[in-house]
Image: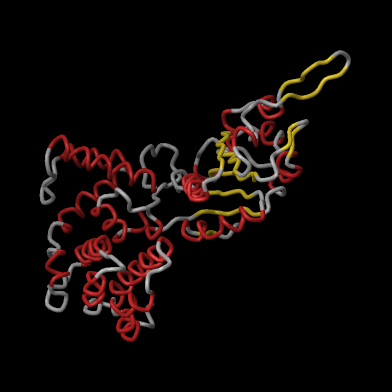
Amino acid sequence: MAMQSVTLTQLTSLLPVYWKLKLPVFFWGTAGSAKSSTVHRFVEQQDIGFIDLRLSQLDPVDVRGIPDIDGDSATWRPFDCFPDEERDGKYGILLLDEFNSGPPTVQCSCYQLLFDRRIGNYKLPDGWVVWACGNRSEDNGVTFDVPAPNANRFANHVHVDPTVDDFDRTGIRQEVIAFLFFRPELLFSYSGDATDMAFGSMRTWTYLSKLYDAWEAEMGEVDRSKPSDLFRKTMQNAVGEGEGHEFVAFLNNYGKMPNLNDIISNPEEAPVPSEMSVMWAVVSGLIGHYDADHEIGGRIIRYALRLSAEFGAVLVRQCHKIDEKAFERNPDLNREKITENIHMLDFSKKFGNVL
């Protein structure tokens, strides 16, 4: 199936368009790619109704309903799993999750819902839209082919392919973010081998971060220079043997990076690491300290001016994204003042070709 990929950041920009036009859209992606959770966040932002219906758990009768016999005639009585305007609100999204994990008979029972917005006597409220999510067949999930007539009922088929830049850093340990900047190809590391129970994904790296937190809460701070064998195995069991081994090895370099407060206090004279893995750790750490509406932002960009074009560009791009999110939260911020404060123009003059 040939589809153009979008990042989670791009998907976030597309969702308001699909929502405004009330278009049925299918979001494809690997397991743990945050496609469903991105829809959930959009629903929360819009403050609209939401029903998550898993086709993998349904039979055709669950979609069609049951016959209500009245004398010599009968009508179809739908189950209450579908949106009801009085109960669920005037506007909302019906998400048919795990769509292609539902057997073909269940998928076919959705024909009329997708195209005519109704099933039997049930009619989808005017303010509601139907979206679907599914995993790719090559990822060894429990999937079935989507019949061509059903696939053609979706206005868009969107393949979600997240990057490290899309990673929601809320509550994620800085060591994890730094490692994924250093080894972005391990963000998704499923090899296609059905025997791989643990592999890298946005979901499992989040689990690893939580396990790290829980470990230190129960057993004390991890010695990054010499982590215990049990700690290493715990990390490997979250994201895979090779991925976990590399992450634990990376922690040793993470411990070698300069003090971030020293860099922010004296960006013109603070040391610049020569080891690539340590440099990734520094860049990630500074991104975590960046604040668009604060003097710290300007100090971080002044340090970026001393870095190689590759690392400086990554640092500035991420800082710029934080700026944009700050403007979304508070449109009254003075964009020109912030741009001047963080010395973006100086960096653009030096590394504009890289940016």
Q: Quadrant of residue 347?
A: bottom left
Tell me what residue is drawn at x 72 percent, y 28 percent.
64
x and y percent of residue 144 in the render?
61, 38
Number of numbered discs on residues: 0
Is 236 located above or below residue 302 in the figure?
Answer: above
User: Foreground residue, 352 or 151?
Assistant: 352
Q: Is residue 43 left or right of residue 67?
A: left
Q: Residue furthest top?
A: 71
Q: Is residue 67 left or right of residue 263?
A: right
Q: Quadrant of residue 308?
A: bottom left
User: Foreground residue, 255 or 335?
Assistant: 335
x and y percent of residue 129 in the render?
64, 46
User: Foreground residue, 306 or 244?
Assistant: 306
Is 229 located above or below residue 287 in the figure?
Answer: above
Quadrant in which the C terminus is drawn: bottom left
Q: Is residue 7 left or right of residue 275?
A: right
x and y percent of residue 272 in the render?
16, 73
Tell me what residue is drawn at x 25 percent, y 42 percent.
235
x and y percent of residue 276 in the render?
22, 67
User: Foreground residue, 250 or 350?
Assistant: 350
